[in-house]
Structures are given as C-alpha cells and as structure tokens.
Image (tube, rainbow, N blue to C red):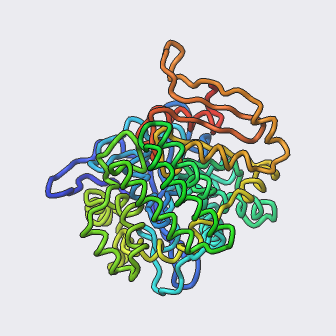
Amino acid sequence: MSAGPLVLLVLMGATQGLPLGEPKESWGYVAVRDKAYMFWWLYQAESPTQSYTELPLVMWLQGGPGASGCGYGNFEEIGPYDTFLRRRNTTWIQAVNLLFVDNPVGTGFSYTTDSGAFAKDVATVAADMMVLLKQFFGSKPEFQETPFYIFSESYGGKMAAAIGLALYKEIKAGSIKCQLGGVALGDSWISPVDSVLSWGPYLYSISLLDEEGLQEVQGSANEVQEALKSGQYVKATDLWSQTEDIIEQNTDGVNFYNILTKDSTFAGKTENRKQRSLELGNVLLGKLYQRHLLPLQRNDLSALMNGPIRKKLKIIPDFVTWGGQASDVFANMAADFMKPVIDIVDELLEANVNVTVYNGQLDLIVDTVGQENWVKKLKWQKIEQFKALKWTAVRMGQKSLETAAFYKSYENFSFYWVLKAGHMVPSDQGETALRMLRMITEQESP
C-alpha cells in the first residue's frame, strides 16, 4: 500500500503540520506463517543527484527481541522524522533506501492471532524474514538489482546474522532475487557471554567499580559462563540478570546503554517492574523486559505510534496495539537469548559475504571489549590478517582535527569503533553513523 500525503498530524494534543516534500514511502503486511503477520515500512532515498533506484537498499533490524524498528529505529534514530515529526538532519534516506521491519512476529505493528505462533529461536526469525523478503523483492522488482544491506542494533544483530546467512542461501538457490551487499552488526548480541565476562574489568578500568565490586561482578559472570557450558540457557539468562543487578548496586545505577549518563530512560521503576512481572508471570522476565525493552516503547513514542501514525497507515487491525505483544515476543525468545551465533558470522565470512561490526565506545551492555573478544574467536581463515592490521582514524572532514571513529578492514570483514556513542550509535552520533553508512555501502571513502 502506498502512502498519500499527510497534511496534519495530531500529537499529544498539539496540531503539527508536516513539511512539504515528504519522502516517498510505502508499507504493508506479509503473512509469514498461519496467523502470523509482519509489518514493513519503506522510505525511498532522497538524493539531489541520483534516482532512488541507483542507491542501495538498507533493512534496519531493532533489538529486544521485541523492539520495533518501525517505531524506535525510525523515529528515534535514522528515519526522516523524529518523535516530534521534525525533519532529522542525519536521516539515512539521504544516502539509501530504508526498509524497517517489525520482527520477530508480534513486535511493533506485527502480530499473531495464535499464542503458539511466536518465534522461539533465530532460525524461526530467519525463516519468517525469508517469506517477507521473497514477497517484498517480488513486488518491488526495481530493488532486485540494488545492493541490499542488513543493518542492525543489539539483539537485532543476532537476528541479522541468521537472516543474512539464510538470505545468502536463498539467493544461491534462486528462490529470492536480490543482490546481498552485506550485513552490519551494531552493538550486537552475537556472543552474550563475552560481553558479560568483560563487564567487570571494563567498569573497573574506568573507575566505576572498586576492587571488591569487581570480584563480586566477576564471580557472578563466571556463573553465567558455567551455565552456558552445561547448556543451561534459561539458567544462564537468570544469572545474567543477577549480574546486572550486582552491577547496578555497585555502580550506583550505571546506565547500561551509555556509561556517562545516569539519566536513564533505562533505569527501572519498581512499579513498572512489578506490573510487567505479573503480565509475564515471571519476575525475572519482568525485570529484564523493563530494563531492556520497555524504554524502547516509552510514552511519547507509544503515543505517536498508536495515535497519528496508526491513523496515517490505515491498515493496522483494530485489535492490534503498537508494542502490545512485545512482552510475548521477549518471553518466547528467552531460551534462545544467551546462545552465541559466532558460527553464523563465520559462515557469512567464508561465503564471502561482507560483514561489518560497529560498536559505541560508551556502551556497556554490549561493550566493545566483549565484541573484540568474540571476534578473536572467529575461525575465518583470514582473521589473523585482520587482527594484524592497525586501525585508521575517521574524521568528519578533511580539515577536522577531531577523531569521530576508528576502523579497520580486511577483504570482506570490517570493524568500526565509534567514539562518544553508546548502545544506540545513530542516536548518539548521527553524523558519524551517516558517514559510516556511506563507507560501508561503498558510497564514500575514508
């Protein structure tokens, strides 16, 4: 379904007019399984010199699992408008066509009418996305020859790796006509235990833990590792949550998503935690949901999505509330949460698919040290050549003296260290993220 012009939107009681020259967009639902429907939203690229068909297509995947790319990624990070419907100066549609998908099923405006239809692992998530992409590229043949990149954030990176590999196989089999340009894993939950084991030393090195606190955090992290070694994945998730509790207690409530701020949209309120625990029927899942997913559905964004945006889209079923099934998505994926997918990244690299890892300097939940540690575990035959390289500084202009990031790249593998950014890199450093996007999609050199 194509969008017509929207002249006025009503947001939080105030009338707000959208500017002229709206981006061209379309959206729709795809039935990926019986009683399971996924929502997508596409923005065409806006370039003063090139047609949108000459520019890459990027699919953005949010984390959670259960966080909405059509909501958070779109309005809080990289879409053409922010949550107040003001034009974003660093929107990615300046450089690429942008496809948001609410996945897994039940996320955002996606929904299921059967409680047994929620995904329980990344294999199901990937299979569902293949159904959606087959229909998408079939209905929009103008994108079949366009370089297609999968960008992601947080748990979205774990899903992106699995989806990228599944897509590579479908393309090779001739089932989907698409030009896979690469997969970009942003602050991604690829190897949870490597993050957890690095939390203590990282916080200690920046004076956010004392020695006693370090020992306490490390002891708890070691228990997570032992649970994983014995295949007790649900127990590992429980212990992971306990490790987060210990960190909060010892650091006076550090923000897991940006260590320099205590303004934590992500810091929990007891009443919210109790309410969500009752809904999930599980105190642990309630705590995790509140800490890591509820902030991505905060009140102003929820009001926008369930009010003006819903009216604009016109196809959202009456019984569907944006984010209404997010807790079910999160709960159903609990047993898969702590499982690593390093092997999938290895398969992508061996298949010669371009893989980029990028990470915010100030992130804790997926800290850069942990990312570097799982990268060292790759069995890719060229990993030693990559590790031997020195990184290169990225600046925002030829005359700029400030370093925005570092990167290094060897053949089809790249790593970007993004400075002054937390977990949500495009939100914290929009200009740097846009520059990085152009570099990864081969539109700009360092």
Residue 96 picture location, percent across and down: 54, 42
Q: Position of residue 120 (x, y in %)?
A: 58, 76
Q: Is residue 131 above or below residue 404?
A: below
Observer-nearest residue: 347 or 260?
260
Residue displayed at 74% across by 29% down: 389
Q: Residue furthest left?
A: 13
| Residue at the outermost right position | 381
Q: From where the camera sits, is residue 177 visible?
A: no
- Image point 43% across, 44% down: which residue? 209
Rendered-image quadrant of the C terminus: top right
In front: 79, or 157? 157
Question: How far across and down, in percent of the image, does residue 277 sit?
Answer: 35, 76
Q: Residue at x 45, y 33 (%)?
A: 420
* Residue 257 appears in the figure: yes
Along the viewing direction, whichever of 245 and 423 lies nearer the viewer: 245
Q: How many marks?
A: 0
Q: Residue drawn 70% across and 46% down? A: 375
125 above or below 428?
below
Q: Is residue 177 left or right of residue 190?
A: right
Please state if 201 lies on the left or on the right of 353 as rendered: left
Q: Position of residue 226 (x, y in %)?
A: 64, 66
Classify residue 293 as left or right of residue 387: left
Q: Residue furthest top?
A: 399
